Image (tube, rainbow, N blue to C red):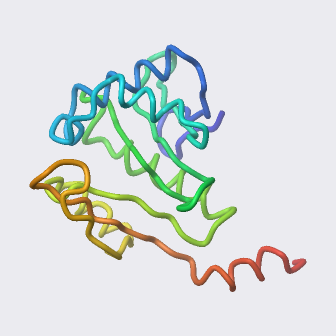
Amino acid sequence: MDILPGYPITITLTTDEADLSWCAELTAMNEPWITLKRTAAGSLELLKGPVSEVYILKEGDQRVGFVLIKQKGSLVGYIQTIAIAEEYRGRGIGEAALRYIEQLIFRSFSNVFLCVSSFNHRAQQLYQRLGYETIGVLKDYAVAGHDEILLRKTEGPISEFSQRKNDPA
């Protein structure tokens, strides 16, 4: 369990059924997942996936949000979902959680990937401000009429990162 810098919020890797169910319900009740037609059941399936890592955010015993990442498979270092409960939005908690997860991913990989929906302009602005670059557009990927924009933040080529990681300091 870690504390998000600047916030009285803990962030912890979880597999707890109650946490995962709460996360699934959070996405089903909020944008962009409403437009993307992701149900609670569909979210729960993703959260329980074999390569899923779910980090729950809590203030005391109160769940605040979560981040779902993939660090195994064909696209490693992929942030699949970040969601903050409505009453906690606009406080910078999502940005702090994102920065925490970036640091976690950058310990093992030289790239962080994520997708943002074409209609989610506020999130696009945040990701751009944090140094993410567009590397592709997935036309009509989740639902017809809306694209998913694939973004990347990098610390350099994989080959250089692997060398740095393996070189003794």
| Residue occupying the point 86% across, 80% down | 167
| Residue occupying the point 37% across, 70% down | 132
Q: Position of residue 70 (x, y in %)?
A: 55, 50
Quadrant holding the C terminus: bottom right
Q: In this view, does 1 lie to the left or right of 84?
A: right
Q: Position of residue 115 (x, y in %)?
A: 34, 58
Viewer-proximal residue among 84 and 90: 84
Q: In this view, does 130 lie to the left or right of 111?
A: left
Q: Above or below — where is 11 with respect to 73?
A: above
List the single residue furthest toward the right.
Answer: 168
| Residue occupying the point 28% across, 27% down | 39
Viewer-proximal residue among 126 and 119: 119
Q: Above or below — where is 74 with respect to 2?
A: below
Q: In this view, does 68 lie to the left or right of 82?
A: right
Quadrant holding the N terminus: top right
Count of all numbered marks drawn on residues in the image: 0
Q: Position of residue 104 (x, y in %)?
A: 62, 54
Q: Above or below — where is 166 with respect to 36?
A: below
Q: Where is residue 110 in the image (x, y as percent from the top left)?
A: 60, 72
Viewer-proximal residue among 70 and 41: 41
Q: Above or below — where is 45 with respect to 68?
A: above
| Residue occupying the point 21% across, 35% down | 37
List the single residue furthest toward the left.
Answer: 145
Quadrant of the image occupied by residue 145: bottom left
